Amino acid sequence: MTLASKITLIRVAFIPIYMVFMYLGAGAPNVWTWLALAVFIVASITDYIDGQIARKKNQVSDFGKFLDPLADKLLVISAMCMFCEWGMMPAWALMLVLAREFSVTGLRLIAVGKGNVIAAGWSGKVKTAATMIGLCVWMAFPTTEILGQLVTAVIVVTTIYSGIEYFIRNWNSLWD
């Protein structure tokens, strides 16, 4: 296993720690939510680090192409679930994100069945970065309603755009 993939696995390992801190924080600004934010930031930074290492040290692998976006999805969705549970994010927005992620994963599975691995596209990376940054800001200021609406809007717009682009670019993978 490459160093890049090990770093990605560390990101996955941070998720339950993040979730425990968020639950203990209960949606109010306190030491637990600040700890959760710190864990989320560190986990998010590993996304950048593992990508840099994979490219610079020629450690790009099919396993990494699969695991890296999965780790991102799990981290981001865990945060969005907490905001939904606290009534701060509408469930339809989370459902939209989940629908996009399941659809893209399904497309990837079809492509893999045909011997092709589809790496994350540029718009997907922008979506992930914008979502991670937006969620960090929201965690820092959870009681600001307008901020929550803005973050939700950014997540929804980037999710829709990247999902549409993903299917347009890889449409041929659906057909024999």
Image (cartoon, grey):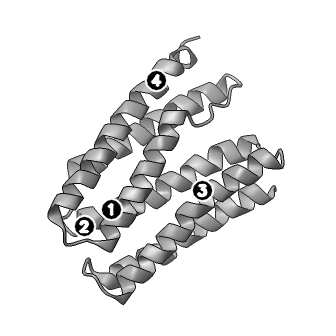
Numbered marks: total: 4
As helix, strand or loop, the secondary structure at mark 2 comes to: helix
Q: Which comes before the other along the chain, label 1 or label 3?
A: 3
Q: Residue at x 54, y 34 (%)?
A: 122
Residue kind at label 4, given as amino acid type: Phe
How dense is the environment of label 3, judged by Cα within 10 Å: few (below 14), some, or many (20 and up)?
many
As helix, strand or loop, the secondary structure at mark 4 comes to: helix
Q: Taking 166 as reference, is 99 left or right?
A: left
As helix, strand or loop, the secondary structure at mark 1 comes to: helix
Q: Residue at x 28, y 82 (%)?
A: 29
Q: Which residue is mark 3?
A: 47
How dense is the environment of label 2, judged by Cα within 10 Å: few (below 14), some, or many (20 and up)?
some
Q: Which residue is mark 4?
A: 167
Q: Which residue is mark 2?
A: 85
Give how far across and how far down residue 78 sits, in percent. Answer: 41, 63
Q: Which mark, by number, is residue 81?
A: 1
- Disc 4 to disc 1, how far (Cα)? 26 Å
Q: Taking 114 as reference, is 70 left or right?
A: left
- Disc 4 to disc 3, how far (Cα)? 23 Å
